[in-house]
Image: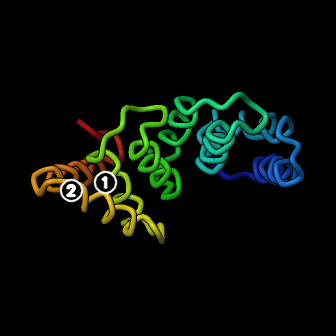
Amino acid sequence: MAFTPVAAQDFSKGLTAYQAGDYATAIQEWTPLAEAGYAVAQYNLGIMYANGQGVPQDYAEAVKWYRLAADLGDAYAQNNLGVKYEYGQGVLQDNIMAHMWYNIASANGHGKAAEWRDERAGLMAAAAIEKAQAMARVCMSSGYQNCGY
């Protein structure tokens, strides 16, 4: 989705509402943008579902929105997928997948993802780390289409 002036206005209206605690308006403004492929709106909906802000808390729904944004290269969504895999929220707990997403987020500029990747690595066998690294390379080289097992 091109970031048109109308989309920018809708996103800003949603952000203002979110910051004011008006989660219903934020969801109303961001959902059409997220459905149209706007990564920041997708990421923000993921946050709202993860935290139960204006919607029932639903980790699986949060993962869905994070994954859509991650597929568009959003480093924060990629990092949050790492968190979800680390803790098994909305997905099965999986250190290899957590490491992979943290590694990708770090490569895309997320400041803390490398630290969290390295924490995961401290809990993993060398073969599992190598698998996670290989999966991260495949994921990135496929334009985020082949990410995982």
Instruction: Give residue 14's position: percent from left, percent from top.
Output: 82, 47
Of 25 and 83, the residue lying toward us: 83
Q: Is residue 45 above or below residue 13?
A: above
Q: Residues within 10 Å of mark 1 (few under 14, many from 20)?
A: many
- Which residue is depicted at the point 45% across and 46% down? 81
Residue lying farthest front? 123
19 vs 64, left or right, is right
Residue 133's tag is 2
Amino acid at the residue labelled 2 = Gln
Instruction: Give residue 102's position: percent from left, percent from top.
Output: 38, 57
Quarter residue 58 falls in: top right
- Which residue is depicted at the point 81% across and 34% down? 28
Which mark is nearer the camera, 1 or 2? Answer: 1
Disc 2 is placed on an element classified as helix
Instruction: Give residue 76's position: percent from left, percent from top.
Output: 53, 57
134 vs 79, left or right, is left
Question: Mark 1 or 2 closer to N-term?
Answer: 1
- Which residue is depicted at the point 33% across and 63% down? 119
Instruction: Give residue 11's position: percent from left, percent from top.
Output: 77, 49
Do the CB atoms of the residues marked 1 and 2 lie less than 8 Å apart? yes
Disc 1 is placed on an element classified as helix
Give the spatial CA distance, label 1 vs label 2.
Answer: 8 Å
Residue 15's tag is none
Amino acid at the residue labelled 1 = His
Residue 99's tag is 1
Q: Residues within 10 Å of mark 2 (few under 14, many from 20)?
A: some
